[in-house]
Amino acid sequence: MVEAFTQKDFDTFKIDGLESRMEAIQQRIQPKFQEIGTELADHLSQKLGNEMYLHIAKHARRTVNPPNDTWLAVADNKRGYKKHPHFQVGLFDSHLFIWLAFIYELDGKSRIASEFLNNLSNLKQLPEDYVVSLDHMKKDAFPIDSLETSHLERFRDVKKAEFLIGRHLLRDDVRLQDNEQFMAIVMDTADDLVPFYQKAMQARSV
């Protein structure tokens, strides 16, 4: 049985020093991201009917402080993902996240936020284990049923505001011990979020 992610992978973020931690990320985690991300990009390309591209976080801007998390992103743009709605899979030391992500560099943010305000009830019909984050730099997330209009209004009106929706798996979640089961969760989560990705892309192009 191949493990998706091991305790050693999560312990990467306890390694001191930028160079040492980055070396561990590159050796332990990024090869897994390459496999997972390639499969996810292929799945989403078929689902959406247009090519989706894999990006793996390089943390290139860091010069002193080591990253507290790392991730892969899948977007419809070959050159980058931060300005675009995108799917993420990544790790903090405490948990793994699977997101549909709209971060602060996003183009067309206010139109996307307005679309989601109109679809708040649909968002809250996602499975109860879904969570929301308002800052991709922080571990914190809250249950989907606690999502309120004010959260989306802030996303619309505040330039640096973000909106991420998806699932968290704690580092000791047994589903991480079986790669097949884990990949099924990734794909299932992506499938649940595709309609909202499509709504965001449509709103942005108006």
Image (spheres, helix red, strand yellow):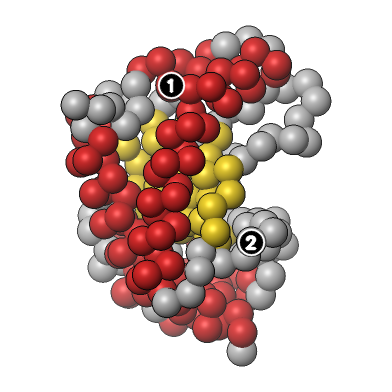
Q: Secondary structure at mark 2?
A: loop
Residue 125 placement, left or right of 97:
left
Count of labels in the image: 2
**Residue placed at 41% from the left, 74% from the top?**
48
- Rounded to the nearest whole Å, what is the CA distance between mark 1 and mark 2? 28 Å
Place of residue 94 in the rendered image (x, y in percent of width and height, measured from the top left): 41, 26
Above or below 196: residue 3: above
Residue 22 placement, left or right of 119:
right
Residue bearing mark 2: 78
Place of residue 146 in the rendered image (x, y in percent of width and height, measured from the top left): 35, 56
User: Can you tell which of label 1 and label 2 is closer to the viewer?
Assistant: 2
Residue 64 placement, left or right of 161:
right
Q: Nearer the viewer, residue 164 or 82?
A: 82
Residue bearing mark 1: 9
Outermost residue to the top: 16
Residue 120 in view: no
**Residue placed at 48% from the left, 41% from the top?**
34
**Residue placed at 52% from the left, 44% from the top?**
72
**Residue kind at label 1, given as amino acid type:** Asp
Q: Nearer the viewer, residue 63 or 44?
A: 44
**Residue placed at 28% from the left, 45% from the top?**
183
Residue 159: give its label: none
Q: Secondary structure at mark 1?
A: helix
Place of residue 110 in the rendered image (x, y in percent of width and height, measured from the top left): 63, 75
Would you call the spot at circle 2 few (<14 residues within 10 Å), some (14-19), or many (20 or more)? few
Residue 181 in view: yes
